[in-house]
Image: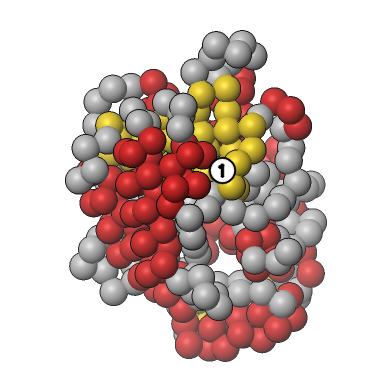
Amino acid sequence: MSGDAELHAVTGAFGFTGRYIAQHLINAGKRVRALIGRDRPNPFGDRIEVARLQFNDFRALVDNLKGVAVLYNTYWVRFNYRETTFERAVQNSQMLIKAAKEAGIRRIVHISVMNPSEDSHLPYFRGKALVERAIRNSSLSYGIIRPTVLFGEGDILLNNIAYFLRRFPIFIVPGKGDYRLQPVYVDDVAALAVEAGERMDNFILDAVGPKVFTFAELVHLIRDAIGSRAKIVHAPPSLTMLCIWALNHFVNDIVLTREELEGLMANLLVSSQLPTCPTCFSEWLRQNAERIGLHYASEIKRHFSC
């Protein structure tokens, strides 16, 4: 990697999506700066610079963005937890956008979510829409990527479905299970993000895989691939959430929130556009069935534990 190479920065570069983006940038010969909020293992060693994502110090945030040509933003929160809230995540994101502009960054590539809406009563989707508006209004050049549910090594949702199918005799599907989702491979999303960093035009793009599944189909697919004998049963969403509440205590985590289930059942994780990413979940699952779900992936341990 040449010292004259263009410098790109990635928020959450040691996390899930950010790690894949950083790897693509390194492979492309870019200098990469990781912006991290807490200490985590560095999988890249001296191939990457490291700086703090300091939302409590605007000047330090600007300084850590100086010299950066393109910022790839994966920062967000999955649910309210202690002092971490969606409202604060929106405020922090707005501060990051303002700091990027002041630091002279020429372009921001933002990882959003499928079907954000400022009118949504679901804070995840509403907050994502507010951040998108802040980017559009910032005068920065931008590419906004809207993925559905991500899969790949290190994911949480689909990994944990496999984990519970491996360890429990029963798996509960909320309602009929006929609501749809369109999984997308995290490495494909990272490739789209890096391509977006090379473009000059402003755009918003859905990042979606080639196949749509019902939730029930997806659970059956995972069960069969890993050789689970768990019985799949259907239950009202209210009863499902009661069972998830018990699971939260079992794994000391928040497995799924009521708002996440509502968004899933409202078909918010499927796109009306043509597929933009080539990797099909069923094919990836066939190749990784022996590894998926071997260990529980904890959201709280990953993002909030020291």
Q: Quadrant of the N terminus?
A: top right
For the point 68% across and 60% down, the residue is: 302
x, y percent for residue 304? 64, 66
Q: Is residue 151 left or right of residue 93?
A: right
**Residue 166 in view:** yes
Compared with 209, 197 (above or below) is above
Q: Residues within 10 Å of mark 1 (few under 14, many from 20)?
A: many
Which quarter of the figure has residue 13?
top right
For the point 67% across and 74% down, the residue is: 253
Compared with 162, 70 (above or below) is above
Q: Decide which of 41, 276 is in the foreground and name it.
A: 41
Q: How is the image coloured?
A: secondary structure
Which quarter of the figure has residue 93?
bottom left
x, y percent for residue 235? 52, 83
For the point 27% across and 31% down, the residue is: 141
x, y percent for residue 75? 48, 51
Q: Quadrant of the C terminus?
A: bottom right
